[in-house]
Image: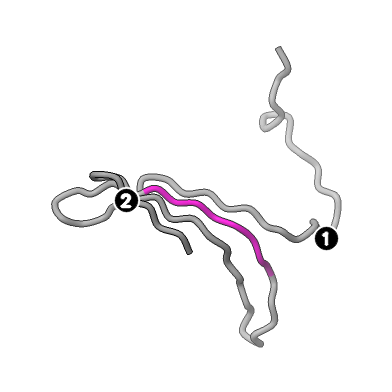
Amino acid sequence: MDIEISGELLIAKGKYQMNNRQNEIIDIGKFIAMYRKEKNAWVLQTDMFNSSLETRSPIEIPDYLVLKKE
């Protein structure tokens, strides 16, 4: 994991691995998270992750999630 701190802003980025109860890998991917220092504590402001694995089956995207082209 890489951590960068600038003033009251901390950015953490790296890779993750998720295992099930049988210790089998069920997902691997990347993440980034932003923290802001408040009252001497780092508070999560936003985070994002995405899997590096292919989806197991095609998914249908609901209309309300489709970005409109301008």
Q: What residue type is labelled 2?
A: Ile
Q: Nearer the viewer, mark 1 or mark 2?
A: 2
Secondary structure type for disc 1: loop
Q: Distance between the residues labelled 1 and 2?
A: 37 Å
Mark 1, Cα crowd under 10 Å, few <14 / some 14-19 / many 20+, is few
Q: Mark 2 points at which residue?
A: 5
Residue at 15 percent across and 55 percent down: it is 40
| In the rendered image, the vertical position of residue 68 relative to residue 29, given as above or below | above
Q: How many labels does the image show?
A: 2
Q: Where is residue 26 in the image (x, y as percent from the top left)?
A: 69, 72
Q: Would residue 21 appear left or right of 53 to someone viewing this image?
A: left
Q: Which residue is drawn at 73% across and 29% down?
A: 63
Determine which quarter of the picture holds residue 69: top right
From the viewer's perspective, tell me whether residue 15 is left or right of residue 3.
Answer: right
User: Badge 2: few (under 14), some or many (20 or more) residues near its Cα, within 10 Å?
Assistant: few
Query: For residue 22, which numbered disc appears in the image?
Result: none
Q: Does the magenta stretch include residue 6?
A: no
> Percent position (x, y) of residue 23?
64, 85
- Taking the spot 64% from the left edge, 79% from the top edge, the residue there is 20
**Vertical comparison of 1 with 61: above or below:** below
Decide which of tag 1 and tag 2 comes sooner along the chain.
2
Q: Which residue is drawn at 76% across and 38% down?
A: 61
Indicate the quadrant containing the C terminus: top left, top right, bottom left or bottom right.
top right
Disc 1 target residue: 56
**What range of the chain is rendered magenta?**
27-34
Q: Residue furthest bottom?
A: 22
Residue at the limit of the structure toward the left, as seen here: 39
Compared to 57, does 19 lie above or below? below
Front-lying residue, 25 or 8: 8
- Dot 1 amino acid type: Arg
Which residue is nearer to you in this view: 20 or 63?
A: 20
